[in-house]
Amino acid sequence: MHMADALVSPAVGGIMLAASAGAIAYSAYKCKDDLDEKKIPLMGVMGAVIFAGQMINFTIPGTGSSGHIGGGILLAALLGPFPAFLTITAVLLIQALFFADGGLLALGCNLWNMGFYSCLVIYPLIFRPIVKKGLTPTRITTASIISVVIALSLGAFSVVVETLSSGITELPFVTFLGLMIPIHLAIGLVEGIVTGGILVFVYKMRPELLETSVANKKLAKTVSIKKVVGILLVFAVVIGGGVSVFASTNPDGLEWAMKNVTGTTELAADGSVYETAADIQKATAFLPGYSFKSTSEKSSAAGTSLSGIIGGGITLLLAGGTGLLIYAIKNKKKNQPDA
Amino acid sequence: MANISDSMNTINSLEEMAEGKTIIHQLHPMVKLVITLLYIVLVVSFDPYNITGLVVLAFYPVILMALAEIPYKPLLTRMLVALPFSFFAGISNIIFNQNLALMIGGIPITYGVISFFSITIKTVFTVMAVLILIATTSLPQISYQLLSIKVPKLIVEQIMLTYRYISVLLEQVSNMYTAYMLRSPGGKGIKMKDMGIFVGQLLLKSFDRAENIYYAMKCRGYDGHYLYAKPDPIKSADWIFLLGTAFLLIMMRFFDLSQIIGSFL
């Protein structure tokens, strides 16, 4: 579900970066008052846990599709909404930098789609009210499933809106949405069950952690974070190691949605398309000065590509020369004795 | 398990690359950060049907990789990760936009095909730019720059800690996996019945190590705040690179050099 830089326009990327930056700033401000030192390493470990979990794609039975956990609700339930959002930010930035999963310009979109909704909207509005009456395994499971399903659907909806408003894909809105939402409902169900299982286990082993988080209280100094971190590491490893047995090479939900469209539609160039194309070309100024417009003349198209190659070659020389110039300047500076 | 050792190899190889001493490595991290962001914005700002203008920007990653002495193979491998989704987004354009753009030797080229190539090229360029950044600049250096642009300290600490714990966890998993495989000849992976012991061992070892790191931090004065070594100030060569590259990139973006030169031919 990570969006790549190439799928967003500068405007959409910039707006979403600004929105997410605002959410980060607000979260950091909220954490400033009530975050003890012990929680900082815990957040770091939780980030690594989510990282390990997200690497694993598991198959969703009957669809030929696979997904990975987002972890937003899980983090929010264990750390509280604001520390959880900050932790997800760190994970997404590392994924974007090291693994080409997402991108720098798309970071705002990804943070919004995968962190903002789950940590800062769904958790306080849905998860916490459900479990507020008292923590029970049933309530935790119910809250997890509902929260994750809604958070993922919101995220998928945002992917559609962001991609379309960037003008990248020409998939019609309804088709795109119709492919994304059902898949992410299914993924959400699976992820919700997994999240519920983890949280119920944590609750049974270390109930105080969930209780303090749900009540939005500070962790008492006597609570041993060691054991909780240990349990979470077990889950990270179970998810990372165990599920990888079932990890499939199937494309994930987003890709499957795209593939489905291409599989059912055939690429055919009818005569009518050619006719309308001629009219459209008259109306559309596509690369003025280029011979793309006069499609009937083959020689001009070849001429364009030739001049393009020559032009590109000269540009390469110029850029290469600039690189050499900088290299020479730096070398000269290095060789000069210190003044 | 392939995922885990893959991730570890990626992190390790990028960390090793970032230790280089070329002029690109020596550039001020902030300069590299700014140029990378500028480049990405310029690349994605291209009209989906303007490929000839777009390819001019190929020279940035090519020249930088040459100057920074970054090997192509590992970066190209990572790039494949980012391509599939863009590929399908592009394929959908081929189907939904069949308006004819031009003919090359009797083969019709539609706008959909052009935008497909445009998306693919943009993906390659943007991913390469980010990989060049991380292959020439270590994460601590980037994190410090985030502090200087007023990113809250807490979030920068989280980036550093998460990053460190990932390495610890992945390295342990990889070692244990190798040990397991050496003791189970002919096995294709970890058996389910062994997972409990495997995971239990991993937990104990990883947790011990993470705890040791935490204590080591405490011994070195950690009081909830990460300490950073201050990087060098921005030098004049950094300014030359920043202004020169930014100028060139903007020129490439707004003047289709190929077209201008081509018109003289």
Image (cartoon, grey):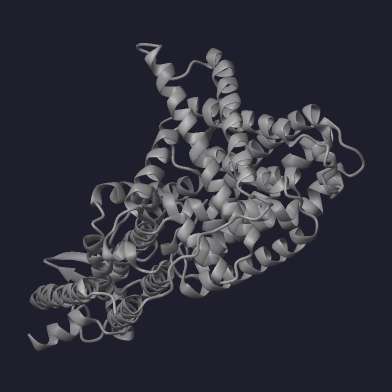
Q: From the viewer's side, name the closer residue of A339 and A118.
A: A339
Q: Which residue lies furthest to the bottom in this view?
A: B264
Q: From the viewer's side, name the closer residue of B45 and A232.
A: A232
Left or right, A158 with reference to A142: left
Task: Work out whether A263 lies above or below A209.
Answer: below
Left or right, B179 with reference to A18: left
Q: Position of residue B20 (x, y in %)?
A: 30, 55
Left or right, B129 with reference to A40: left
Confirm whether residue A185 shows in the render: no
Q: Which residue is drawn at 57% across and 45% down?
A: A183
Q: Quadrant of residue B151?
A: bottom right
Number of numbered labels in the structure image? 0
Q: Residue furthest right?
A: A133
Q: Position of residue A107 (x, y in %)?
A: 52, 61
Q: From the viewer's side, name the closer residue of B176 and A261.
A: B176
Left or right, A145 with reference to B147: right
Task: Work out whether B210 lies above or below A185.
Answer: above
Q: Residue at x 41, y 75 (%)?
A: B234
**Quadrant location, the C terminus of chain A:** bottom left
Q: Residue at x 45, y 48 (%)?
A: A255
Q: In which quarter of the image is residue B198?
A: top right
Q: Where is residue A174 in the image (x, y as percent from the top left)?
A: 56, 60
Q: Where is residue A220 in the image (x, y as percent from the top left)?
A: 85, 42
Confirm whether residue A246 shows in the render: yes
